[in-house]
Image (spheres, grey):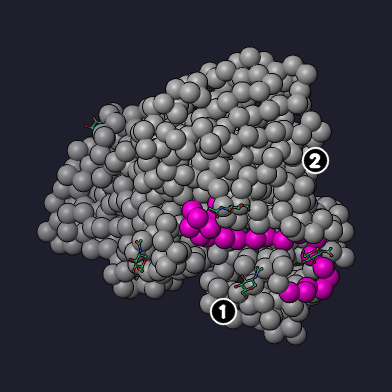
């Protein structure tokens, strides 16, 4: 920590004169104004290959040929023939299940020699790790009974045929019924490259003329907390709970919003339906998601709920409310079955198995006791269809409130804009803007009436530093990765959320995840590829706020509405620690003087600082360019602190 004189002295002489004059004094009020709400910081789950090809640990892309048109080459995405094999996606006359009508048909051409079959390239790569044992499985059947007897070879190999793991299973053509194969693959080495493939082959010469149909492939590495059908370890750690290493078993988000967001539905027919996402994987048809790719729905409602339970997060669960992003709203007379479907969805989560069929289904799937649930969101961004939301909100909210009087329902229209009946007690507010907008709007909630309405800042992010480019496509001017200028703007805004956390009960940056190989939206909190995660500057900003919440908010001198310094003060009562968060959105370091009203204040404290140039970011090329740095600072009842240019700062000091 530099003394105030020194910090002024090191500035260029031109600025020297103004230096002393610009010390910002912050006096803290000695009486807590309100407690910090338990859900203040959490996660919103979306956007680009965030489930499939992201946090859901399945490694094979297009594993079950869901929602594809058979007999066209496009239906084979992710797959390729090996050694002259003939492969095709067919509508199987004897499908594996009603939900999975398509199979992969392999025919061994005449003249075949060596191993013949097909391979899957994964989601832009497969992470082959010799520390792991992979569970591989699929179903096969011989559509025509034959005398064939041989074996299928299952391998993990590089794109040029270096074999890392192999296993073989005997097969016979004596039956046309579906048979399941499950094998373990343990690689002998860990290639750095993820350009690897999963292959299934048969000895060509002995199988000439044979046809074998395949369905529902799967390849899983070990998963987060060991759950079957579970989550990719490094991404799950990054999203929820960060350990002492670079991954994140410590963000400690307190809520998780699902299934969307936009994921609730692009169109009526492709909307998210809870009942299509539960039960055996072979009973899940999948759906065309709204981010331009088919969803397996392997990560379904029960998986989301287990995730919340495992991570001690509160679910904020949305129900589809009669409107899809393509703009179509259902007429009021048609709403009844969808209100019932929403009731069923909620009963699956919290209903009594003795009286509710969806709850009985949950019990049969291994979770008889209800999950914890307080908040249900009615729709997503329904301000986009605010006319129809008048009756949709009314009908959904009235029925759901009557059925579940102890739940809290969240409206998704603009809070200060129009009159909904019944009056919402909770609103979800979304904003994608520039750093400047966020800093200016640090005071957004200061003037909101304290009248029993509470706010969820459910999606917010700096998406561009140029107001003309907020939603331009392709993303000219849009950030690919969050940068310091943006993250500092978000931090300024977040100090306002803390100040107003008597009425702002929850907030989440959005979206959460982005596969660098295939993304439709940027920036996102955490980027990843087939083998690594890249937490952004905004990630660390969220983490600093989440891990340093405190239990009560202390009023202090208000920041200037047109200034570059923003702050908020809380205290963690159990540890008697005063926590001061500061965002400096300016291009120069700023000197601050804090006056704490407590009887005794420790003479040293900690400062954790995230700072860098305006454009500094963490990307796959420079993953650790900006990281929080902790140091000791001199503190006391009155102490000065210099906040670096473009910095997010958390000061912690013991005070009684
Ligand atoms: C390989 O697995 C080990 C053990 O789980 C893990 O520590 C390491 O990060 C993994 N490597 C990659 C590239 O995923
Ligand atoms: C199996 O082999 C037997 C004896 O060679 C032959 O008669 C029969 O037609 C074969 N069956 C099939 C399905 O090819
Ligand atoms: C498959 O694994 C076995 C050992 O389990 C090994 O002997 C054989 O060479 C492997 N095959 C290939 C093609 O790597
Ligand atoms: C893999 O298979 C083993 C044993 O067959 C099982 O214990 C484990 O839970 C499975 N792992 C996953 C991620 O499915
Ligand atoms: C889910 O339930 C709806 C009715 O609520 C029904 O129309 C639909 O077919 C079901 N989907 C699946 C996959 O079971
Ligand atoms: C899942 O599949 C198993 C075995 O096929 C079956 O016994 C079980 O009833 C199925 N579960 C559901 C919920 O359909
Ligand atoms: C509280 O005031 C806001 C306007 O600031 C209004 O939109 C909302 O409906 C009011 N809530 C209640 C419960 O009256
Ligand atoms: C009211 O809604 C319109 C869009 O319908 C939006 O542009 C405007 O910002 C909203 N006003 C407020 C105060 O949220
Ligand atoms: C902002 O975006 C607009 C539209 O793409 C462009 O014309 C303008 O040059 C950009 N301004 C800056 C400062 O990048
Ligand atoms: C900033 O706002 C304060 C009070 O709101 C005002 O006195 C001051 O002139 C403003 N400064 C600038 C540069 O706009
Ligand atoms: C300062 O950091 C040290 C080391 O991380 C920690 O033990 C101590 O509790 C921190 N002090 C405060 C007041 O948070």
Label whose residue precedes the other's in the sequence (1 or 2): 2
Above or below, 433 relative to 656: below
Q: Nearer the viewer, residue 497 or 209?
A: 497
Mark 1 vs mark 2, CA separation in Å: 41 Å
Outermost residue toward the front? 17
257 relative position to 76: left or right:
right
Residue 298 is one of the magenta-drawn residues: no
Q: Residues within 10 Å of mark 1 (few under 14, many from 20)?
A: few
Q: Position of residue 114 (x, y in %)?
A: 16, 48
State the image quarter where residue 587 is shown. top left
How many numbered circles does the render carry?
A: 2
Q: Do we see residue 457 in this rendering?
A: yes
Quadrant of ligand 8: it is: bottom right
Tell me the residue at 41%/61% (across/down): 466
Residue designated by label 2: 34
Q: Which residue is mark 1?
A: 327
- Whether ligand 7 has any atom under 8 Å from the Cβ at mark 2 is answered as no
Q: Which residues are magenta?
A: 418-439
Q: Quadrant of residue 85?
A: bottom left
Q: Is residue 385 above or below residue 487?
A: below
Residue 566, x across and y down, in percent: 59, 43
Q: Residue at x 82, y 68 (%)?
A: 423
Asked whether the viewer can see residue 292, the reply is no
Identify the residue at image location x=31%, y=73%.
72
Residue 556 in the image: x percent, y percent?
A: 71, 38
Near mark 2 (Cα within 10 A), the count class, few <14, some 14-19 or many ≥20, is some
Q: Are marks 1 and 2 in contact (CB under 8 Å)?
A: no
In this rendering, the label closer to the viewer, 1 or 2: 2
């Amino acid at each position: 920590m530099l003394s105030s004189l020194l910090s002024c002295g090191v500035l260029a002489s031109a600025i020297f004169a103004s230096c002393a004059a610009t010390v910002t004094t912050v006096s803290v009020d000695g009486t807590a104004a309100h407690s910090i709400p338990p859900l203040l910081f959490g996660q919103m789950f979306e956007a680009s290959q965030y489930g499939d090809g992201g946090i859901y640990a399945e490694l094979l892309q297009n594993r079950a040929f869901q929602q594809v048109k058979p007999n066209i080459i496009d239906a084979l995405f992710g797959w390729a023939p090996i050694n002259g094999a003939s492969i095709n996606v067919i509508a199987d006359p004897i499908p594996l299940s009603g939900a999975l009508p398509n199979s992969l048909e392999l025919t061994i051409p005449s003249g075949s020699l060596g191993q013949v079959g097909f391979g899957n390239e994964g989601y832009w790569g497969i992470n082959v790790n010799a520390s792991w044992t992979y569970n591989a499985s699929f179903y096969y059947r011989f559509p025509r009974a034959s005398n064939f007897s041989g074996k299928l070879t299952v391998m993990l190999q590089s794109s040029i045929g270096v074999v890392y793991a192999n296993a073989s299973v005997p097969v016979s053509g004596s039956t046309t019924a579906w048979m399941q194969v499950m094998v373990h693959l343990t690689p002998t080495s860990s290639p750095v490259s993820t350009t690897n493939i999963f292959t299934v082959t048969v000895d060509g010469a002995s199988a000439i003329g044979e046809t074998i149909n395949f369905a529902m492939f799967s390849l899983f590495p070990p998963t987060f907390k060991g759950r079957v059908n579970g989550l990719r370890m490094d991404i799950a750690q990054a999203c929820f709970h960060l350990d002492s290493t670079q991954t994140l078993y410590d963000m400690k988000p307190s809520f998780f919003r699902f299934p969307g967001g936009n994921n609730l539905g692009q169109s009526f027919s492709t909307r998210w339906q809870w009942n299509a996402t539960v039960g055996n994987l072979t009973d899940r048809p999948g759906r065309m998601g709204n981010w331009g790719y088919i969803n397996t729905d392997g990560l379904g409602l029960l998986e989301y709920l287990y995730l919340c339970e495992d991570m001690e997060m509160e679910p904020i669960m949305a129900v589809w409310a009669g409107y899809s992003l393509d703009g179509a709203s259902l007429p009021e007379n048609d709403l009844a079955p969808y209100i019932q479907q929403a009731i069923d969805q909620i009963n699956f989560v919290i209903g009594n198995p003795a009286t509710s069929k969806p709850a009985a289904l949950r019990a049969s799937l291994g979770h008889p006791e209800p999950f914890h649930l307080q908040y249900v969101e009615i729709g997503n961004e329904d301000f986009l269809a605010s006319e129809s939301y008048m009756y949709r909100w009314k009908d959904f909210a009235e029925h759901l409130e009557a059925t579940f009087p102890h739940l809290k329902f969240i409206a998704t229209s603009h809070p200060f804009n129009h009159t909904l009946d019944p009056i919402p007690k909770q609103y979800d507010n979304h904003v994608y803007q520039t750093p400047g907008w966020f800093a200016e709007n640090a005071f957004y909630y200061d003037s909101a009436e304290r009248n029993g309405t509470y706010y969820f800042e459910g999606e917010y992010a700096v998406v561009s530093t140029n107001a003309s480019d907020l939603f331009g496509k392709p993303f000219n001017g849009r950030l690919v990765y969050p940068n310091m200028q943006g993250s500092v703007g978000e931090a300024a805004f977040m100090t306002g959320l803390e100040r107003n956390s008597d009425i702002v009960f929850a907030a989440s940056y959005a979206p959460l995840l982005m596969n660098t190989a295939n993304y439709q939206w940027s920036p996102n909190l955490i980027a990843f590829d087939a083998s690594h995660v890249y937490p952004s500057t905004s990630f660390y900003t969220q983490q600093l706020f989440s891990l340093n919440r405190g239990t009560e908010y202390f009023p202090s001198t208000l920041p200037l509405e047109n200034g570059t310094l923003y702050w908020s003060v809380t205290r963690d009562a159990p540890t008697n620690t005063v926590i001061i968060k500061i965002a400096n959105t300016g291009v120069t370091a700023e000197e601050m003087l804090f006056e704490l009203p407590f009887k005794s204040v420790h003479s040293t404290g900690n400062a954790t600082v995230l700072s860098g140039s305006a454009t500094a970011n963490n990307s796959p090329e420079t993953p650790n360019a900006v990281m929080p740095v902790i140091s000791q600072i001199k503190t006391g009842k009155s102490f000065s602190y210099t906040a670096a240019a473009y910095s997010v700062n958390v000061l912690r000091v013991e005070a009684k």
